[in-house]
Image: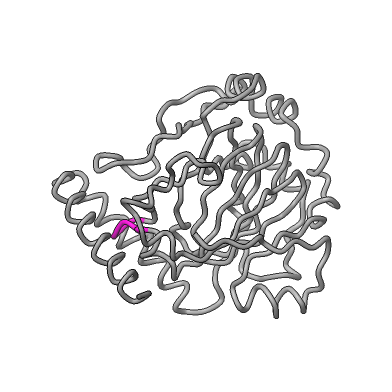
Amino acid sequence: MRLEPIEKTSVISDLDFKKSYYQPGKPLVIKDLAKQWNAYNKWTWDYFKEIVGDKQVGIYNNTKSDAYTPINKADDYIRFGDYVDMVKKGPAEWRIFLFNIFNHAPQLTEDFTWPENLMKGFVKRAPMLFIGGATSITHMHFDIDMSHILHTQFIGRKRILLFPYTEQHKLYRKPFEVLSLADFSNYHVNSGNPDYNRFPAIKLARGYETILEHGETLFMPAGYWHHMEYLDSGFAMSLRAIQRNISGVAKGLWNLVGMRNIDTLMKKTAPQWWYEYKKEKIFQEAEKELKYAK
């Protein structure tokens, strides 16, 4: 992999952000954007446990999906308060995915402001909380709705690996899915992941990496592939903004309505055949990338 650090800045003007990052689709970490929010100091494990501790939530382990795995199916269910107690004790390879805590505690929306000076099109009905125990992993994928994301970290640190959408075949994207076939777990240490012998095109992929600290906000442009590893137990909030062009909106709608339904149907009716078919296509596309690079 050919990686460079994601640029970080404490503050940035609206004009500079739009010209240098939003329009060209380049990631950026804004260090102080969220530090003016009440949420910066107010949102803690104990506070969340107090207001939504009795809610049942789906939790996910570190196992990558296979031919039989439905999209976004939780591996277990637990009370949120019990989950908090578990991750506060130390390493716990469990995370909560797309938890709309604001449905249960709408007063939380008063603790932050929508940064509409930076971009328009925020989906205000659906800010999402992402929570993980230390060592938990969000595997390499891109967001199915193709939205721009402002991802703010609260409590703990998170290691993040990013690639533009155009690197998809070098990353061994599964057809009709938003996932990579390769495992990037602990990519930063010599752990054998990703497996360059099996997935040699990954060596050609150009991307970015950073460690996101408490209070920092990552701008992740639409379609960016991302892999995240929780260095500490912590949580983050994503604010999503729909692309402001017809092609971007159309791509997101196709992914949500067409692509996902086709994949779900095939996984139910012919899971192993579908998996093998997709694997063949994956390696065909990767081989094209390798030949092009020679």
- Residue 11 drawn at (x, y percent): 83, 64
List the single residue furthest toward the right: 36
Q: Is residue 144 magenta?
A: no
Q: Residue at x 61, y 39 (%)?
A: 101
Quadrant in the picture for the C terminus: bottom left
Going by the image, does 250 lie left or right of 48?
Answer: left
Task: Look at the image and give the residue range highlighted in magenta.
Answer: 172-177
**Dominant SS type (magenta):** loop
Corner quadrant of residue 155: top right
Display coloring:
one colour
User: 162 above or below 158?
Assistant: below
- Residue 243 drawn at (x, y percent): 54, 71
Q: Nearer the viewer, residue 146 or 93?
A: 93
User: 290 above or below 200?
Assistant: below
Going by the image, does 276 lie left or right of 56?
Answer: left
- Residue 182 drawn at (x, y percent): 37, 49
Q: Residue at x 61, y 56 (%)?
A: 209
Q: Residue at x 50, y 42 (%)?
A: 190
Going by the image, does 281 lie left or right of 232?
Answer: left
